Image (tube, grey):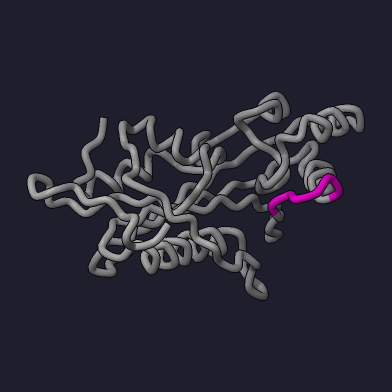
Amino acid sequence: MTASDVPTNGVADPRPPLILASASPRRRDLLARLGVVADGVAPADIDESPLPGELPRAHAVRLAAAKARAAAAIAPGALILAGDTVVGAGRRILPKAEDEATARACLALLSGRRHRVFSAVALLYPDGTLREALSETIVRFKRLSDAEIDAYIAGGEWHGKAGGYAIQGAAEGFCGWLAGSHSGVVGLPLFETRRLLQAAGVPLA
């Protein structure tokens, strides 16, 4: 997306266009639950590597803000909504699984234990004001057998997912207990997102 692709709302609607700094269909679907359809998308290509000693919570917040700022450079004058979801096991940041070995290692680590999912949201205004919110969810997985891990890996839904799983898919059957935001684990915490958009004057359902 380029700046010229950013839609305008016309003279009758002075609100800046809302741009989602993500190409994720999951985030678009979650946003639609609030009755909101972004005027455009501007996927932010940033380095998502953790900083030395960075903890999962701080990592999620930093990346959400960085994505918002990167998208603002593509779509100046827009209201930018960005998010980032990080799975943490203790102080450890679990990677986004891009291969079977990584997904398998993540599932083995999460098997039979609790972990935390940090889902940060950043809303960047056209004047540079940044509003942020964070959802923290505790998830407990059942103990996974080798056969269960093999079957999940074969299904392929782990690809590109933080921690090697998608809670909205078959992995929900591994979740014995969850405290916090289910939508946050999926990728966009709706309670926090709603509050940020409402404060910005974005019409909601």
Is 99 part of what is drawn in magenta?
A: yes
Q: Position of residue 38 (x, y in %)?
A: 34, 43
> Relative to residue 20, is residue 70 depicted above or below?
below
Farthest residue to the bottom: give it.
52
Q: Quadrant of the C terminus?
A: top left
> Relative to residue 37, is residue 175 depicted above or below?
above
Q: Quadrant of residue 12?
A: top left
Q: Position of residue 60 (x, y in %)?
A: 54, 58
Question: How many labels were placed on the picture?
Answer: 0
Question: Predominant secondary structure in magenta?
Answer: loop
Q: Looking at the image, which residue is at 47% across and 59% down? A: 64
Q: Is residue 84 left or right of residue 114?
A: left
The magenta region covers: 96-101
Farthest residue to the right: give it.
146
Is 185 part of what is drawn in magenta?
A: no
Q: Looking at the image, which residue is at 84% across and 48% down? A: 105
Q: Nearer the viewer, residue 150 or 135?
A: 150
